[in-house]
Structure formats: structure tokens, C-alpha cells
Amino acid sequence: MKIHEYQAKELFQKYNIPTQGGIVIEDATKADEAVDKLGGNLWVVKAQVHAGGRGKGGGVKLAKNKEEVIKYVKQILGMTLITAQTGEEGILVRKVYIAKAEDIKKEYYFGIVLDRNLEMPVMIASTEGGVEIEKIAKESPEKIHKVAIDPQIGICDFQIRELAKTLNFNKIVSRRFSLFARNLYQFYMNSDAEMVEINPMILTDDDQLIALDAKVSFDDNALGRHKDIAEMQDFFEEEESEIEAHKYGLNYIKLDGNVGCMVNGAGLAMSTMDIIKDEGGEPANFLDVGGNANAETVAKGFELILKDSNVKAIFVNIFGGIVRCDRIANGIIKATEITEVKVPVIVRLEGTNSKEALEILRKVNIANLISANDLKDGAKKSVQTAIGV
Ligand code: ADP
Ligand code: MG
């Protein structure tokens, strides 16, 4: 789960990670009051969306007076912001954050990500902050410094010193950086974060280090023990169908292809996507209906798949182990009662009660039901149906 910059900064404050306060508004008429509350004479107006590169896309503006703040708030609120991370369709801005502009002596990149190969969090720092880190990583990787932190030991002094040295900090700043790094690591571990990215972390004219931007994502599976963080979820920023799926205990991820997939078990769902690709097709989604699938959840699965207008065929691939095939068959029937299934459905049922299931399906005589002999046959028929062969 991702959160907004302003929310990440609220959490930073709890961990004594130096950052700046600001005011979030969703209504342009509140800009005037926000400026008065903040004080100062130079401000930034920043779009709050779950995507980086806002500055380049016109979502971060520097304002010299109150009138300019109001002008930019009006401009940014409600705009469709397109950045390198949003894709062409962009993302609607519903919230803006107003903060005082800081004196920037230098911008750095600083963050922590989970390295799945090392099985450890890795702290990353670079003097090349402010611009896209991906670009630096590609063009001049020697400018990015990393230290892997063994979670059993925690972060060590020598590791922080190593990073401080690569950032060319003097003694005083190094001391401040040490505290910054420790607190950030504490935050990362305690909150089950997956990624914390501060780009830029700035050095001010009076040698203070401040987190000026903040991107944080958390491990979804750990949200149960972080109610305060879970409450920060902004549903407007998530794929609507994925949230809907979550409510029904379905594991659904929308993809770009045209073969809808309804599968039980994450492993089988992955193989189904692979085999569809092998047959020259493109899956429209990942959907694991889970072991407790019943008629209702299967019907919901169909509804979700059919919401995607790209879908031209649905491949139902069920191995009846924990879930019984007849349940799935009843779900398919229920789905056709609730929503009109306009596309052909290719069914491969194997395992517990598969014969009964086929019998159930045969009786209802759904117009476009194609049964498959096995996995490969099912994938082939699905792809051919989707491309209209
Ligand atoms: P993004 O990474 O999405 O473009 P940032 O928050 O990093 O958004 O802002 C982009 C740039 O705008 C920063 O690199 C910095 O140069 C400038 N900036 C952002 N916030 C402030 C601020 N409070 N004071 C001064 N400059 C800022
Ligand atoms: Mg940034």
C-alpha cells in the first residue's frame, strides 16, 4: 500500500525524522487561510498523488506571494497530472499540499528498499538527488551508494559513516545524518515498510538535513498490525476493481490483455498466465479465487473480469483440491444469472467433483460455454476465441 507525501511526512515526524510541515487542502477556497497559518514569504504548492516526477509534470510550483499560491492551487487541484510514472492517461489531483519553500544548498537522494535477493533492507544514498534515481542508476551507477542492513544486527555506525563519507558531509552534518538514518531505519522496520524514498533530502543553508519529499509503501500483509497506517489508504488512488475484489477475499490484479482468467490458487493462476502467453495470447488479469470459493465469490470474480471491456474470452481453470469443482460450476451459473456473460467461457475443471461440475454446466446450457480437455487445450481455445480465430 502506498501513501501520500503529506501522510509520510506525518509519520516521519513521529520518528523524529526532520521534515517540513504543511497543510493539505481539497478545496481552493482554503488556500488563503492555509498561507496565513503557515506564514513565511515563499511557498510550494504540490499535487498529492501516488506517483513520482510531479515536479516535471507541472504538479509542484513555487509561489512568491499569496495570490500565486491561490493561482497554483486552482491550477493543480482537479488537473490530470501526467508524469513518467502515471502513463499517458495521467492521474486526477484531488489534494494539494502547501508548504514553506526551503533554502536548498544541495539535494540528495536517500532511501531504504527491501532487496529480495539479499533478503535484507538496503539503505541507498546519492549526491545526485532531485532527479530520477532510475536514470542515474542506469547512466552513472557509481554515484549510488548502498549498504545492506542485516535485520538481526540492525544498522551499524560504520555503515552510516560509510554513507556520510560518500555524501561528502562535514562533521556536524554527518552527526545529523547519523540520527536521520537511524530514525529512518527504525521507521522502516517498525512500520513494515517496503520502500522509503526521500528525493530530495536537502541540506539547507544553515546545514540542516530535511526530508523535502517522501514516498513510502508498506507490506500489505502487515497492515493488520498497523491500524493507523491502514487508515491512510486513499481509495481514489487504487485500481477500483482491485479494491472491490479485496472485499470479497479475491486476489485480483488487472492486466492489459484480453483473456480473462479465473483460477484457484496463486501458483496455478501464474501458470495459467504463462500458458496463455505460450499460446500467443495476453492475460487480462490475475485472479485467484482461493480455496474457499463459493458461488457468490465466483460470481463476483466474473463480474470483475467482465468490467474490463478488453476481455474477449474467459478461461476458467480450476483444480478441485480444497475447492470443489461443483461449487465453481454453481458459481458460473449464478454469475450468468447476475451478470450477462457476453463473452465465451472456456472451462477446464479437474479434480474433486469435476464430473458433477461438468454435468451441472451441461444442464444449464450456457450459450458460449466451451469445455477443455486439459490445461493446454483450455489455454489454446481461450486464446483462439479471444483473437477470433
Ligand atoms: P517530485 O519528486 O514528485 O517531482 P518533489 O517533492 O521532489 O516532487 O519536488 C520536486 C522538486 O521541487 C524538488 O526536487 C525541489 O527542488 C523542489 N521542492 C519541492 N519542495 C520544496 C520546498 N518545500 N522548498 C523548495 N523547493 C522544493
Ligand atoms: Mg521527489
Image (cartoon, rainbow, N blue to C red):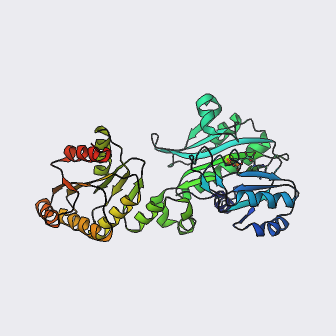
Q: Is residue 339 above or below residue 106?
A: below
Q: Quadrant of residue 297?
A: bottom left
Residue at figure coordinates x 27%, y 67% from the top left: 336
Q: Position of residue 388 (x, y in %)?
A: 29, 45
Give left or right: position of 190 versus 174: left
Q: Is residue 298 above or below residue 62?
A: below
Q: Quadrant of residue 47?
A: bottom right
Give left or right: position of 80 versus 235: right
Q: Is residue 108 above or below residue 243?
A: above
Q: Position of residue 79 (x, y in %)?
A: 67, 56
Q: Is residue 387 above or below residue 74?
A: above
Residue at figure coordinates x 86%, y 61% from the top left: 66
Q: Position of residue 335 (x, y in %)?
A: 29, 67
- Residue 51 appears in the figure: yes
- Position of the C terminus by quadrant: top left
Is 265 or 358 nearer to us in this picture?
358
Q: Quadrant of residue 345?
A: bottom left
- Residue 294 appears in the figure: no
Numbered circles on residues, count = 0
Residue at figure coordinates x 74%, y 48% from the top left: 176
Q: Position of residue 337 (x, y in %)?
A: 28, 71
